[in-house]
Amino acid sequence: MREDTAYREGVLDSAVRAAKIPPERVPIYREMYDRDPTGTVQLIQSLSPGVPPEAAAALDEFAGQQSPYPRELFPELARRPRAALGPAIARAAEESPSLPSPGAEAPLPATSVVAGLSEQLFPEVRERKARPRSRVTWADR
């Protein structure tokens, strides 16, 4: 029994070191192992290794650094932050009907509401509509 406990702790410790399971979840995997040792070992072996906690700090630091690429290459970064979309969503909620009761089929929002939201949320839609059209590349309805 003592050897089994040592093996279990070795399996769980190596899984934590490989970042397959977070340290706070070890008690759950310990209980799983006590119920089904073979199945738990197979489950842990099937998990992909993650980012070890010591490397996570370096990744967070790297994420905060300035990108070496110009922002023009990524137009999605120029979009308004979600917090600025609050008024557009509130207007859409006012214009669309109230929410249906649970179990009832939800009505579709009006076409004008969807078109208005598309223009407010995605500036490229507004720009595309403003361009003169020589051939059909964009369908409104």
Image (spheres, helix red, strand yellow):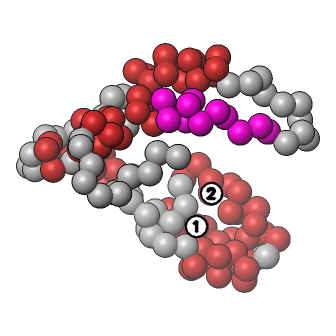
Q: Is residue 83 left or right of residue 41?
A: left
User: Callout 1 environment at 10 Å: few (<14), some (14 to 19), or many (20+)?
Assistant: many
Residue 26, label in figure = 2
- To which residue does mark 1 refer? 12
- The spot of residue 33 in percent (x, y) is 73, 70
- The spot of residue 45 in percent (x, y) is 56, 79
Residue 125 location, quadrant: top left
Please report whichever mark, 1 or 2, sits nearer to the chain's N-terminal start. Answer: 1
Q: Which residues are magenta?
A: 106-117
- The spot of residue 124 in percent (x, y) is 30, 41
Looking at the image, residue 31 lies above or below residue 125: below
Residue 55, label in figure = none
Q: Nearer the viewer, residue 28 or 67?
A: 67
Q: Secondary structure at mark 2?
A: helix
User: Callout 2 environment at 10 Å: few (<14), some (14 to 19), or many (20+)?
Assistant: some
State the residue at coordinates (67%, 34%): 109
Looking at the image, residue 12 lies above or below residue 97: below
Q: Amino acid at mark 2?
A: Val
Residues at marks 1 and 2, CA–CA distance in whole angstroms:
7 Å
**Is residue 48 part of the magenta span, yes or no?**
no
Query: Is residue 17 visible to the viewer in this orientation of the structure?
Result: no
State the residue at coordinates (65%, 76%): 43
Q: Is residue 92 left or right of residue 72?
A: right
